[in-house]
Image (cartoon, rainbow, N blue to C red):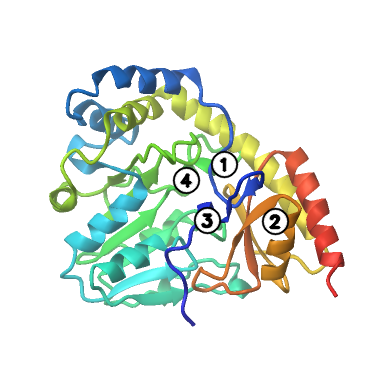
Amino acid sequence: MSFDLDHHGDAEVGAGLIDLAVNVRHQPMPDWLSAPITESMATLAAYPNADSATEAVADRHERDREEVLLTAGAAQAFVLLAQALKEKKRPVVVHPQFTEPEAALRNAGHEVERVILREEDGFRLDPATIPDDADLVFVGNPTNPTSVLHPASDLAKLARPGRVLVVDEAFADTTWRAGHDGEPESLAERRDLPGLVVLRSLTKTWALAGLRIGYALGPADLLRRLAAAQPLWAVSTPALAAARACASPVAIAAEREIAARLTVERNHLVDRLRRVPSVTVAGDPASAFVAVRLAEADRIRADLRKRGYAVRRGDTFPGLGPDWLRIAVRDTATTDRFVQNLREVIEERP
């Protein structure tokens, strides 16, 4: 079965539609973030200088500066990895997950092997399913689109000399666990695992998708190879200002508060969805979106559009198929209205 790896949630959104297709938080930008971005506009005559932003991100994750590479969104890092590591013989992508890693690998000429996680296992990763001789492995945590959060201990088992292990933590800041001060199951501070590269995005929680800012964390020698494949001045001055602001203690505290609220809103969505006949929620959702299985999902998605709601089709994700949709977490009032419309659309089925 072929999949459209280049299809993304933004293609589902249209004028007048309530956006449940894109996993970006819909809230006003706080002053501590908007102010430095706005102020940076006065310095656009100068070429971008990433030094202070790199240092801020390194301090946040308790790393050396050489272990941080700022990128034009986390998606750019996938391209850099695919281009810089062309000598890798057996790249493996764990699916279902964000499709850009595989797309970037294929565009760079790699032959990609897929490891497909199973619904009956809750889409949880079993480290034993990864081939021993895989020398480049991509896995998301929490995983888009299933919203499953894998134990850090399971991911750590995949790290070994000679292998580059890429963990996409674009949604790590959306996760929360009672009694845990930081991001549960994140590997961003782990410097002891050989070949580990952690990718992060600032575009989701802070609604910066149009600014394109993310970063890679990993061994200095490997990041130097990625930097050599990166265009000059790849990250804009406003994006660098955002990176500095989002690495501050104020930002980190705000992220934890947002993640706690998101947990309540996600639990509300999951509870409502599980009350709808014929709808199955995948796994144990832990992020800003939920994957659901239901018959005639494509027709239901089209009918929801007629009612003003955009949701993400699931058939472009390897490991899912035509009976899947991805739904973004929104406030509880929006969720209640959406689920009522979903229920009505299902009941109208011939």
Q: Residue at x 57, y 41 (%)?
A: 176
Residue 39 appears at what percent x and percent y?
34, 17
- Distance from disc 3 to disc 2, alpha carbons, whole Å, reads 13 Å
Q: Which residue is mark 4?
A: 172
Q: Amino acid at mark 4?
A: Ala
Nearer the observer: mark 2 or 1; the answer is 2
Residue 51 appears at what percent x and percent y?
19, 29
Q: Along the polypeptide, which appears first: circle 1 or circle 3?
A: 3
Q: Amino acid at mark 3?
A: Ala
**Residue 11, labelled with which disc?**
3
Q: Residue at x 28, y 45 (%)?
A: 217
Q: Secondary structure at mark 3?
A: helix
Nearer the observer: mark 4 or 2; the answer is 2
Q: Secondary structure at mark 1?
A: loop
Nearer the observer: mark 4 or 3; the answer is 3
Mark 1 and mark 4 in contact? Answer it, CB < 8 Å. Answer: no
Q: Amino acid at mark 1?
A: Trp
Q: Is residue 173 left or right of residue 83?
A: right
Mark 3 and mark 2 in contact? Answer it, CB < 8 Å. Answer: no
- Distance from disc 1 to disc 4, alpha carbons, whole Å, reads 9 Å
Residue 151 appears at what percent x and percent y?
48, 56
Q: Report which quarter residue 324 is drawn in.
A: bottom right
